[in-house]
Image (spheres, rainbow, N blue to C red):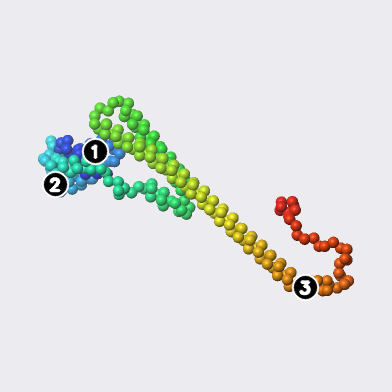
Amino acid sequence: MSIRHGLLALLERGPRYGSQLRTEFESRTGSTWPLNVGQVYTTLNRLERDGMVTQDGEDEAGHALYVITEPGRSELRSWFRRPVDRTSPPRDELAIKLAMAVGAPGVDIREVIQSQRHHTIQAMQDYTRLKAQTLDSTPADRDEVAWLLVLDQLIFQTEAEARWLDHCEVRLIRLARRQETADGTAGSTAGSTAGSTAGGTAGGTAGGTSQETPAGPAQVPAAQAPPATAPPEPTATAPTRRGRRR
């Protein structure tokens, strides 16, 4: 917030003293960004140091009056023409909070989002109510018009913040689903690999045993040899229906 240029804009309307500048600044902005007198006089001293304002006597109550100088007017006109720089945005506590909450142990980021959304929507409703109250009567002076502009900005800002929070929640849900899918795929692949390895090992062992075991009727005692009419030993077949159920 440029208090410096705000005070210059007020001084262009005529000489002012510190407390008067604070009152008019807050009237223009609806006390959205309150100032204290010390802040005002510190800024005035810096402006005077830079040659943009100068003291010009006192009023009847003994208050030191300040007036804008020509360099101050030039700086003010340049400020009005110059776009507000967005390449280096100010720190946003909410954005930093959500960024730090991602993956933080013991923190439910969706709960953080829902809590903030409730607060943001409440603020938007309060601003909208203030705007409706202000519009009940046609704005009588420029201070009221200035306050309406500030209110509109606050309403649009909170509305955009609520939409951004909705977007954050949707993004987190999608990421969680992708993670679940990836974990399921990894588990399925690991299970298939383990089954294939176990089957191959069992087959290899069975094959090796059949090669090492002597075969042929000469190795079986005659008393134990099966009758010639006995049917052959059944071979392995496909699983039965009961086997499939298991």
**Residue 227, above or below 117:** below
Residue annotated with mark 3: 214
Secondary-structure class at tag 2: loop
Q: Residue at x 81, y 71 (%)?
A: 216
**Residue 22, above or below 87:** above
The amino acid type found where label 2 is placed reads Gly
**Residue 187, above or below 204:** above
Residue 116, position as x, y percentages in the image: 42, 43
Q: Residue at x 45, y 43 (%)?
A: 114
The amino acid type found where label 1 is placed reads Phe
Which of the pair 45/227 is nearer the observer?
227
Of mark 3 and mark 1, the one earlier in the sequence is: 1
Secondary-structure class at tag 3: loop
Of mark 3 and mark 2, the one earlier in the sequence is: 2
Q: Residues within 10 Å of mark 2 (few under 14, many from 20)?
A: some
Q: Residues within 10 Å of mark 1 (few under 14, many from 20)?
A: many
Are dots 3 and 1 in contact, CB under 8 Å?
no
The amino acid type found where label 3 is placed reads Pro
Q: Nearer the viewer, mark 3 or mark 2?
A: 3
Mark drawn on residue 51 = 2
Which of the pair 64/149 is nearer the observer?
149
Q: Label 3 vs label 2: CA separation?
A: 112 Å
Residue annotated with mark 1: 25
Secondary-structure class at tag 1: helix
Quadrant containing the N terminus is top left
Q: Residues within 10 Å of mark 3 (few under 14, many from 20)?
A: few
Q: Is residue 189 left or right of residue 175?
A: right
